[in-house]
Amino acid sequence: MPYRPSFAHVSLRGIGLSIAMATMVAGCSSASEGDIAVAAGAGGADGGSEAPKGATCELCGDASTTTTPTAPTTPVDEPDASPSRDASPDAPPASQDVCPAPHGVHAVGKTRYMHGVNLAWKNFGADFGGIPQWGQKSVSQDPEAFTAWMRTMKTSGANVVRWWVFPEMKGDGVAFDAFGVPTGISATLRADIQKALELANANDLRIVFTLYSFDGFRPTRTESAVVTHGLHDLVVDPAKRDALMTNVVSQVAFEVKNSPNRDRVVGWDLINEPEWAISGSDAYGDPQFDPMPDLQSVTHPQMEAFLKAMSAAVHGQSSAAVSVGSAGIKWAKAWSQVPQDFYQLHYYGWLYEYFNYKTVTPASVGLVGKPVVMGEFPWAGLPAVASRSYPAVSASQFMKDLWDAGYAGALGWDYSDWSPDTVKSFAASHPCETHY
Amino acid sequence: MPLRLDAKHAWLLMLVVPCVAVVLFAFGEHGETRAGAVIDVPAVVAPASESRSAASAPARALPPTVAVVPRAAVTEDDAAGETDATAIEAMVRAGHVGAARTATYEFFKRYPSSARGAALEALTGMHRPPPPPPS
């Protein structure tokens, strides 16, 4: 007989868990309170700070520094960007767009439905930069493997690939000094970005780069001779945050800008599901955040300042559209003050019961005026909710419903367990509107 | 000889017996997985006024709404993971999605081949962790 917890048992354990979590949250909050005012006040106070230079990159000291950028600037206080951004100077004018998707995302002179898949990584945290100590190769070090993946994606009807750059900062992608301050990106990382765009071009795919993830809020640690640098301090310390923007984020965006295949990048996802690393509430009336207890959480003002700085850094170098990979419509207003060109939501079973996508729509929660892309949903479909008589929803039905509801795209999770037939079928029903 | 209790002893018994029962049940083996780990099942009843919040899940019985994927053979992993998976589903329904995601992350590490993994991922949106680094 399966175990069924009694009320008494559950209560006692629940109390213990609550005390532990409350202690942890209180500790995080008190430790970072002093930074909140600084962060709020410093959100771009150093606009026009000097651009990253090759000389600051500790990993670029070899001959491969030929790609050292020529002083891109990082306008931290750049105003909100236009929803319509054209990434390619060679793109045809919008008037030549023969099949604009009704609610699509504009890029390279076309308005299209972002139809595709989350790659999302081949080697977690190693696709860009590599982890030589673990024998994990990056895109440029093992292009054949990535080529095979991308070829399959394309032949299966995908047009957009969401690809994670720094789900965690480990390996040889980013250099740090002894104080944990990021000082630059490596030659390997630059080569990886160039190779990724080259492969996308060869396979006629477009990329949405996901720069960071909630995963990055696990503590700094060393495993098998590899240091993983946690994001917490880089978010709450304004000086470290600015260094990250100047020496890493700007550099990555500049590397894209510097590529002959730059128009392959149609979007940026600043961070994947930051809500899981936030304690407390936002100031916009959303429900309280529900942080994962194994992460070092920050406050919403701290995360918001981080994302504003990152948006400015990316917009300063790239004309591709920017978004935040929100965990779900539950916290719909959380990033309303972060300059974005399209909204991005994710959807899994936990949302279905209380935020049924058929009734809780972007418009119903105030997400209006910009395209809305479903950046993640499970290929396995949504499980039924017996208590509300909600039926299970297949991925193909979900994709059709999103199109009908006016979404601007849908990227399933993920390539490792996707259904090529589902992707191909949808693409066949909207062949032009889904192809940039 | 019949057992006789005066009023004082009867009161003592009435106090002591339930306390002992609660302590034994709470700190017994219930809820611990075969791997020795404990996944807490929160018993939180959130205010009903938050109609759209997952935290407003009313208290109710805990049958899983995520169907268990049929499988040809039950491995030890599956059997051991069954209890943990059910507890994670209960956490989600009780509105503790963040904690459920962390529990799912640990679940993937503990039961990498469990047939319940795909359903948990579709429910919580928590993805499988990368393989452990080489030692």
Image (cartoon, rainbow, N blue to C red):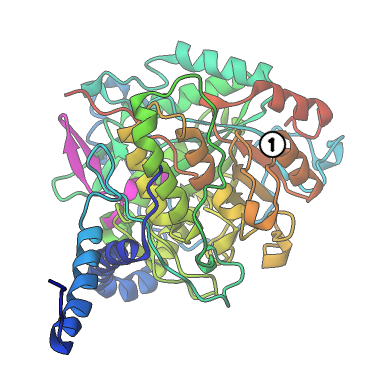
In the image, farthest residue toward the front: B1
Where residue A243 appears, as percent x and y from the top left, is: 30, 52
The part of the chain drawn in magenta is: A212-232
Which sits in the foreground, A365 or A128? A365
Q: Is residue A227 magenta?
A: yes
Tell me if I can see residue B30 in this picture.
yes
Residue at x-position 43% and y-position 52% = A74
**Quadrant of the rendering where the C terminus of chain B is positioned:** top left
Residue B24 occupies quadrant: bottom left
Residue at the outermost bottom position: B7
- Answer with left or right where residue A435 lies relative to residue A60: right
Q: Residues within 10 Å of mark 1 (few under 14, many from 20)?
A: some
Does residue A28 sit above or below A312 in this rendering?
Answer: below
Examine the rendered structure and indicate whether residue B99 appears above or below residue B70. Answer: below
Q: How many marks?
A: 1
Output the chain of dot 1: A
Relative to A170, does residue A307 appear above or below in the rendering?
Answer: below
Q: Residue at x 15, y 81 (%)?
A: B5
Along the line of sight, the residue nearer the viewer: A207 or A215: A215
Q: Is residue A151 above or below residue A94?
A: above
Can residue A202 be seen here? The reply is: no
Q: Which quarter of the picture shows residue A383? A: top right
The x and y percentages for residue A300 are: 42, 67
Name the spot of residue A212 as percent of width and height, x first: 41, 45
Q: Is A409 colored magenta in this rendering?
A: no
Whether residue A383 sits left or right of residue B86 in the image: it is right
Residue B126 in the image, given as x and y percentages of width and height: 45, 43
As drawn, is A40 to the left or to the right of B36? right
Residue in front for this viewpoint, A181 or A12: A12
> Is A111 in front, or is A258?
A111
Q: The residue under label 1 is which amino acid type?
A: Ser
Query: Which residue lies under the disc numbered 1?
Result: A394
